[in-house]
Each structure stands twice: as C-alpha cells, then as structure tokens.
Amino acid sequence: MARLTGLCAGTPVSGGVFDISASSIASGINSLDKMAIVTGTWSINEYVTDHPVIDKDLFMTSIYPIEGKWLITEASPTSASNLEWFINNFMESDRKTSAEQGSSVYDLCNKLVSSTTPG
C-alpha cells in the first residue's frame, strides 16, 4: 500500500465519515427509533436501520459508522431556499421590525422554532 500511495511504510492513515453520517452521529442517531433532519442548503432527512434499503427512488443508502447499521437518506437542495421564500412572502413586516430593533428575521425564526414542542 505504501508504494501505491507514495507514503512511507508505517505511516498512519485514517479515514473519516462524510458530513451526512457525521451530522447524524452528532445528533445522537444511534438506534432505529430516532431520525435527524438537517436544514442547510440541502434538506436532508435520515434514519438508521439494521438492513440496507435498495430503492431506485431513494436518494441514498450508505454504510453507517456503527457496526451493523445503515444510514437511509432522503435529500433535496430545497431547505434554505424554502426558508427564504417563506420569509419573503410571509414575514416581510417581521423582517423590517427585526431590522429596526437591531436584530434579524432569522433570529426571530430561531426563537419561534425553539418555542415549539415535539409532536
């Protein structure tokens, strides 16, 4: 392997997980009764299962960094643009009020979301 990589024999090499798996691990997704939703540029919905799901309409199934588990992922590049659309169409007055108060409409969105209860 050293010859193939150009590294000296004995050089430690490690591999990590990609961001989707890392975010679900950081969210505590370690059993079949939990799922995670990542909202950024992409909307990523993910859960862990004990068997791979093979479906041509599914975004992705990948090996999970917990032995015997698979990460099932559905995603689309819509999350941030949906929030921006909602703010532009329904929160324009909130945007102005927030700016006048030296705040951001996104701070207001965070406050509104944090006031909700699960379920």
Image (spheres, rainbow, N blue to C red):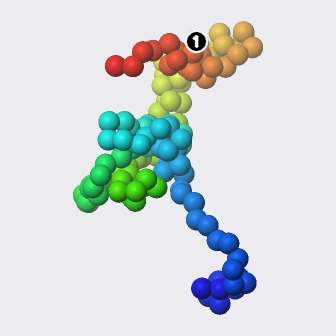
Residue at 53% from the left image edge and 56% from the top image edge: 18
In the displayed image of the protein, which residue is found farthest to the bottom? 3
The residue that appears at 29% across and 58% down in the rendered structure is 52
Q: To which quarter of the image does residue 97 belong?
A: top right
Q: Position of residue 12 (x, y in %)?
A: 67, 72
Label 1 sits on a secondary structure element that is helix
Say which residue appears at 44% left-offset and 37% top-offset.
37
Instruction: List the residue tagged with mark 1.
Output: 93
**x and y percentages locating residue 46 in the rendered image:** 39, 44
Q: Amino acid at mark 1?
A: Ser
Image quadrant holding the C terminus, namely top left
- State the residue in front, 79 or 20: 20
The answer to whether 51 is drawn above or below residue 102 in the figure is below
Q: Say if 74 sits above or below 82 in the image.
A: below
Compare residues 8 and 91 and report the one nearer the observer.
8
User: Does the image show residue 88?
Assistant: yes
